[in-house]
């Protein structure tokens, strides 16, 4: 290697160190700022800890999918390495290896295996999406979610009694956005509507999001979805997951899960027509 090239390499390396440090600092700051990003854990395949029964369904589907994908990847990599290491061209022989064509068993194998894999994925995905999108029976708590540029209006109906709507404005902290209060261990039905553009209702801890599309009639089941909350209290960030305009990133809101007694109190103080 010439001395000039060595110097160039060294100066390149010297330049890279501060760049890497700056990137690390940027990442650290970005993570620190995003206080509404739920903690991701490897044991959950980097998904947030779910707070609904349906979230459990998504979590299992996701675990099955990434474990199957990793296993497939491992088998493929081992096969590639095996072929590359043990079936290299020998220096001693100038001849071509045996040329195999139309090997029926191998061709059937590499047609059937992917078909089986895709069918297994399809079966579990279809089964779970049917569970997740099913709307049945009467949920004791119903929430009408109206999305607009750029916030949300939540109108909750509990056993036929409608509470005062909660509406928000664009904010940069989800704690300042509109808050939807729901009881734990309860089936909740959401009805999504909007008059302007397409939004998407997303609470990461539900492990579910649904587009809010203008012009869909009220009786269309595509507007609705149901969840059953787990026995986990807390405040969870929500956001719009569909780029909908200039303040899209500020369409923040929160979902607060409370024990039933606290929810009853909330109902008493938020009757429609009250000053709250
Ligand atoms: Cu939006």
Image (cartoon, helix red, strand yellow):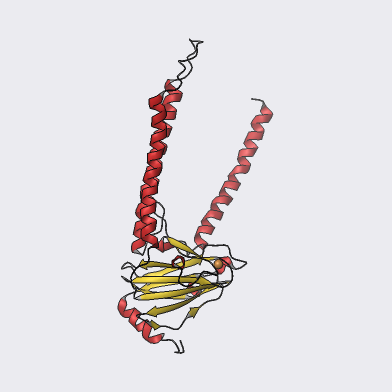
> Which quadrant of the picture is home to ligand 1?
bottom right
* Residue 2 as seen in the image, left or right of residue 33: right
Asked which quadrant contains residue 15, the reply is: top right
Quadrant in which the N terminus is drawn:
top right
Residue 261 point in image, percent of width and height: 30, 80
Q: Is residue 129 visible?
A: yes
Q: Which residue in the rendered view is the most extreme toward the bottom?
A: 274
Asked which quadrant contains residue 112, the reply is: top left
When the figure is inspected, residue 83 is found, relative to residue 127, above or below; the finding is above
Q: Quick one: 139 or 253, which is closer to the camera? A: 139
Residue 50 point in image, percent of width and height: 37, 61
Q: Which residue in the rendered view is the most extreme toward the right?
A: 4
Q: Quick one: 126 or 169, which is closer to the camera? A: 126
Count of marks overlaid on the render? 0
Q: Residue at x 47, y 81 (%)?
A: 165
When the figure is inspected, residue 206 is found, relative to residue 156, above or below; the finding is above
Residue 134 point in image, percent of width and height: 37, 63
Q: Residue at x 31, y 77 (%)?
A: 260
Q: Is residue 42 visible?
A: no
Quadrant in which the C terminus is drawn:
bottom left
Q: Quick one: 31 or 15, which is closer to the camera? A: 31
Residue 141 point in image, percent of width and height: 37, 75
Q: Quick one: 91 or 14, which is closer to the camera? A: 91
């Amino acid at each position: 290697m010439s001395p000039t090239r060595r110097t160039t390499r060294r100066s390149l390396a010297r330049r890279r160190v501060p760049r890497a440090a700056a990137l690390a600092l940027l990442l650290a700051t970005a993570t620190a700022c995003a206080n509404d990003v739920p903690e991701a854990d490897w044991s959950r395949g980097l998904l947030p800890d779910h707070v609904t029964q349906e979230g459990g369904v998504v979590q299992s589907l996701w675990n099955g999918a990434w474990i199957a994908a990793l296993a497939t990847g491992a088998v493929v990599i081992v096969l590639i390495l095996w072929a590359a290491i043990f079936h290299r061209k020998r220096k001693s022989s100038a001849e071509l290896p045996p040329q195999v064509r139309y090997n029926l068993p191998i061709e059937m194998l590499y047609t059937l295996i992917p078909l089986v894999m895709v069918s297994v994925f399809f079966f579990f995905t279809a089964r779970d999406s049917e569970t997740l999108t099913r709307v049945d029976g009467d949920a004791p708590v119903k929430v009408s979610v109206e999305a607009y540029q750029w916030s949300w209006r939540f109108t909750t109906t509990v056993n036929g009694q409608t509470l005062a709507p909660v509406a928000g404005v664009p904010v940069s902290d989800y704690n300042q956005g509109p808050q939807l209060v729901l009881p734990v261990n309860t089936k909740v039905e959401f009805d999504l509507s909007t008059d302007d553009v397409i939004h998407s209702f997303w609470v990461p801890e539900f492990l579910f999001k649904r587009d809010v599309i203008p012009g869909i009639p009220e009786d269309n089941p595509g507007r609705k979805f149901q969840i059953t909350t787990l026995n986990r209290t807390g405040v969870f960030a929500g956001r719009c997951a569909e780029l909908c305009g200039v303040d899209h990133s500020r369409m923040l809101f929160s979902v607060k899960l409370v024990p039933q007694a606290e929810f009853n109190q909330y109902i008493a103080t938020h009757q429609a027509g009250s000053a709250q």
